[in-house]
Each structure stands twice: as C-alpha cells, then as structure tokens.
Image (tube, rainbow, N blue to C red):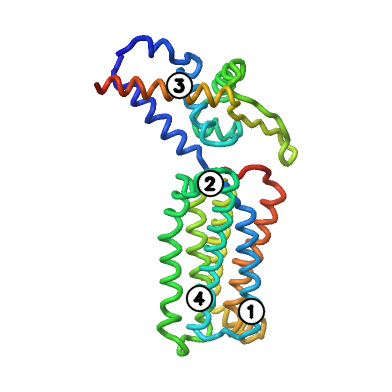
Amino acid sequence: MNSNWAEENLQTIRTLMERSAVYRRALAPIMLLAGLVGLAAAVIGLLLHLDSGRGFCTFWLGTAVIVVAGAFLIARQQAIKDKEAFWSPPTRRVAQTMWPLLLAGAVLGGTPMVVGGGDAPPDCDSLTAIIWILFYGCALHAAGFFMPRGIKLFGLLFMASACVLFYAFFSGIFYVLFFTGWISESISGHWLMGFFFGVLHLAYGAYLYLTEKGKNAA
Amino acid sequence: MNPELLLQLDRVIHEKGRLAIMSMLAASPELSFTELRDALAMTDGNLTTHIRALQQEGYVAVAKSYQKNRPLTTCSLTPAGRKAFAEYIHLLEQIVRQNKK
C-alpha cells in the first residue's frame, strides 16, 4: 500500500469539504437590506435632484458602502449567534470572487462621471447605472459558484438586463424615450438603480425569506 | 507504521464513495440527494447504496419532503456520524504523522 494514501485521503476530504461548504449565511436579510437601502436611495436621489455626474456617483457609491457594511454586520451577527467563524472559507471565497468585479465596475462606471463632473453628458448617469448593473451581475454570477444556485441566476438576470439596456442606450431608444417624455434625462439613472438594486433585491430577499428555512451555515 | 491504527479505521467510512459522501456532509448542514449526486458524479443507484449503508450504521439521516410539489430528499450527518468522521480523520492524521517519522 502506498505510504502516502492517508495524506491523499486527507487532501481529498479537505477538497470535498471545501467544495461542499456553500455560503448560505443570512442571504435573505442581506438581500432585504440591500433592497430597502437601494429603494430608499433612489427615492432620496430623485427628491434631492442629485443629477450632476459627481453627485450621482458619490451618492450611489456611498449607498453601496452602507449596504456592504450592513451586509458584513448581519453576517457577523449571525456567525456570532451560531458560534461559527465569521471569515469562514466560503465567506472568504465569495468576497474574493466579488471584489475585483465590483471594483472594476465602480471605477469604469464612476470615472467618466467624476472626471466629467458637471460637464458629463445628460444621460451619462444612465450609462453609469447600466455599467454598474452589468458588473454587479458578473460579480453575483461568479460568486454563485460558491453560493446557492439562485444567486447565479439572479446575476444572469442583471447581466442580461444590462445587455438589453446597453443596446437601448446606444441604439437611440433612450433618446426617443427622453424626447417623448417617458423618462426624464435627469432621473433615469436613479430609476434604473432603484429598480435593479432596490426592487429586484427586495423581491429576491422576500422570495428567499419565504422559501429558505434554517440554511444559514457558512 | 503501527498496524493497529489501520485496524482502527472505520471500514464503513473508509470506502472511497462513502468517504466522499461523509466529507461533503461534514461541511454542510444538509445536502440534497441531487446536490450530492452532481458533486460526486455518482449514479443514482450507487449513491443510494452508499447512503443506505451509512444510514444503517447510523451515520447519516435521510429526510424526505416536498419542495414546489416535487419530492426532495435531503441527507445530513447524525451526531454519531460526525463523531465517527472526526475519529476517522484523527486516525488518518496519526498515520500521516507516523509515516513522516
């Protein structure tokens, strides 16, 4: 018998355990939090007319920071309650998978707005929102390999929607909507953000809340 | 190598397929039959046989329910299964340590 068989067995066990350990911690509360904050931010953005490029970007990136911080707090609270390690391998994998795409999206979507400042084209906030939706969808889809299957589908929904919106943006449909008065050029970005990061997250959070039971371990 | 350590290894867990099932279940509160089958690339029959063996030993609990009107079979480790798995790993670690001496 190969003298290394015990070591190989241990390695196999470790690999299988890592593959099996799927991140499930507090998904419903995190989605509900993201949805509520997203929706509230959209309403505030519309009411306060945060229409300048810099204002739009700063406001929504600030909102994202609040949501991420809130999500970490909820996950940490649950880890403490369940007497588990917060920075568990599944949590680490999900965070490591998502951050490069989220950072790329934030930079790519935010730079033209911040650099352009007040001179940014009037519909630039829509384009920024679409870029953020696309990259967020990519991040969710990538993280979905270490999370329940629904997350991957949720990410695909964002990606597909962003592709359709990109087409609409560059094919001139957006301009037609502006001129026909269906959407105002100053509010479309907030509407997009409110729908995708508010309404959709709330809906998914509610779905998870109603369908999942006791699947919280990370 | 101390042959006594080898003899102490749990024969039920030591089988390759059952060890894979136990490893997957040890890292998750519960897994569905489909998740296990897909992750381990086993046939339905093969997985059923292994799960039945582990169930008879009292290592694995099987629960049948319905999700969206479709039958759902979920498997989880019992406390006895978790203890046996921990002991199995402990023995493997001892064997590895002995080999390195």
Badge 1 is on which residue?
A: A44
Q: Are marks 2 and 4 in contact (CB under 8 Å)?
A: no
- The disc at residue A127 is 4
Query: Sequence order check: which comes first, mark 1 or mark 2?
Result: 2
Structural distance between the alpha carbons of marks 4 and 3: 56 Å
Q: Are marks 4 and 1 in contact (CB under 8 Å)?
A: no
Same chain for labels 4 and 3? Say yes or no.
no
- x, y percent for residue B23: 48, 29
Structural distance between the alpha carbons of marks 1 and 2: 32 Å
Taking the spot 29% from the left edge, 19% from the top edge, the residue there is: B98
Q: Secondary structure at mark 1?
A: helix
- x, y percent for residue A62: 52, 73
Structural distance between the alpha carbons of marks 3 and 1: 58 Å
**Which is more foreground, mark 3 or mark 2?**
3
Q: Secondary structure at mark 4?
A: helix
Q: Secondary structure at mark 2?
A: loop
Q: Chain of mark 2?
A: A
Q: Chain of mark 1?
A: A
Mark 3 burial class by Cα count in 10 Å: few <14, some 14-19, many 20+: many
Taking the spot 51% from the left edge, 56% from the top edge, the residue there is: A140
Structural distance between the alpha carbons of marks 3 and 2: 26 Å
Mark 2 burial class by Cα count in 10 Å: few <14, some 14-19, many 20+: many
Same chain for labels 3 and 1? Say yes or no.
no
Q: Amino acid at mark 1?
A: Ile
Q: Amino acid at mark 4?
A: Leu
Taking the spot 55% from the left edge, 58% from the top edge, the residue there is: A73
Which quarter of the rendering shows the C terminus of chain B?
top left
